[in-house]
Image: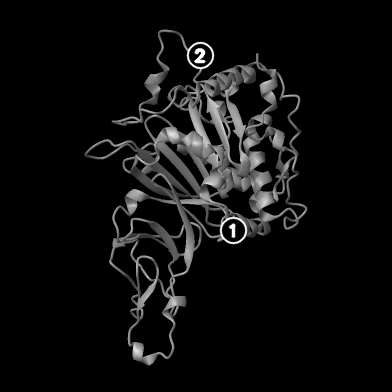
Amino acid sequence: MEQQEIKTLRALMEYEAARTEPPEAFPHLPDIPAGRYTDPRFFELEQAEIFKKSWLFAAHFDEIPEPGCYMTWEQAGEPVVIVHTEKGEVKAFYNVCSHRGAPVVTEPRGKRLRLTCKYHGWSYSLDGQLQAVKDPEDFRDLDFSCRSLPPIRCETFGKFIFVNFDPEAISLLDWLGPIADEWREFQFDQCRLSARHSFDLDCNWKIAMEANTEVYHVPNIHPTTVAPLLDHRRNVNTLYPNGHGRMVAPPPRVSETENAESTRDVGARAEIATVSEIARTCIQSYGIFPNWVSQLTEFVLAPLLFWPNGINKCRLECWTIAPDWGDGPGPDYWTLNNGEELCKILREDTEFGTQIQKSMESPGFKGVPLSYQEARIYHWNQNADRMIGLDKVPGDLGVQQVIGDDWVHPNDPRLAHLN
């Protein structure tokens, strides 16, 4: 992060602390309709138009480290196999044999020279090309060239592997936009996978995710865990194209005898030397549309992914990715005892989600009146409707497009009020 951007962020922190109302130019946010959390119509639109057309973080290169390594992946509801090819590329395919539709691989991960279906023995190269069939003499005019494994868009950012089910989607770098440049200081291409754990939650996936995309709740839900680490009144939200967002919050003001840094030990044994001042001294977290929330520090890259398993259930996936720590176990940012349970901060966020879900399903829940501090949630919903298609969203479930491009990076009306 350049020094001028650091200076601007510091000035915005003081602007946020001093204001007594939302910025004059910031629009009023209409209520988010209740049905976006409970209505099957909106859930189906999310599945078809958001999760099937967005770039989704699926795997880390360390999970398929050598040519021939593969892994299966089904978090987005489709059977996928991700493969490290002989040329060193990463490719993704539907895990569907072109003969009778059986899965080509059934093990969660492994290493092979070819991908061979157990059902009838059809065999594919690591590039997905059909190579051989059992009893070829029993087929007439079988064209191997059109029987390849169905491909899925697959691109990488450093060692992070993303997939997209939409063949017409923009590139991953275009999807990330300016965030890709901001992330380069974190060396995504050098950091190792340290921990990956999943937990099933009894609430709509957006309930769980939104608890990690605003700091308005911090004093109430996290009085002894997060509140001592950040000053929620000095938090600076930034909105980016494609529904992404970022928060940067400094630690509370402390006396010279107190050491705020002492609370930042995550058990890491190495650090990313290129990380700038902001990530070293503040809580910095990115929301990447549709389902990624990630704190980035000099010690760890820690994505949280939220996957819908139904209207009122979801899966929380907790990742810890860190600079090379040498031999032995690496850090685990989000869980205790190697994934036995969530850390206290995430328990505080998730345990309340079940109760929120029950309340939202009652006739008493009409909608969500968001505050200025929760603008990233509204920005996400605006982008969701644009991806779905404004004409496809039922009128009683849509959000109004009130946050204009003048509030989307690199634009920011707050800058005009800085000294």
Q: Quick one: 25 or 38, which is closer to the camera?
A: 25
Residue at 69% x, 50% y is 386
- Measured as percent of width and height from the top left, residue 254 is found at 47, 12
Horizontal arrangement in the rendering, residue 232 relative to residue 79 (left or right): right
Residue 348 visible in the current orientation: no
How would you rate the neighbour count of disc 2 (Cα within 10 Å): few for under 14, some for 14-19, many for 20 or more?
few
Q: Amino acid at mark 1?
A: Gln
- Measured as percent of width and height from the top left, residue 241 is found at 62, 41
Q: Amino acid at mark 2?
A: Arg
Name the quadrant containing residue 48: bottom right
Residue at 47% x, 76% y is 146
Name the quadrant containing residue 324: top left
Image: 343 above or below 103: above
Horizontal arrangement in the rendering, residue 387 relative to residue 112 (left or right): right
Check contact, mark 1 vs mark 2: CB within 8 A. no
Image: 119 above or below 282: below
- Measured as percent of width and height from the top left, residue 187 is found at 39, 36
Which label is found at residue 47? 1
Question: Helix or strand or loop: what does disc 2 sit on?
Answer: loop
Residue at 46% x, 56% y is 154
For the residues labelled 1 and 2, the Cα–Cα distance comes to 44 Å
Which label is found at residue 253? 2
Q: Residue furthest left?
A: 327
Q: Quadrant of the C terminus?
A: top right
Question: Helix or strand or loop: what does disc 1 sit on?
Answer: helix
Which label is found at residue 203? none
| Of callouts 1 and 2, the N-terminal one | 1
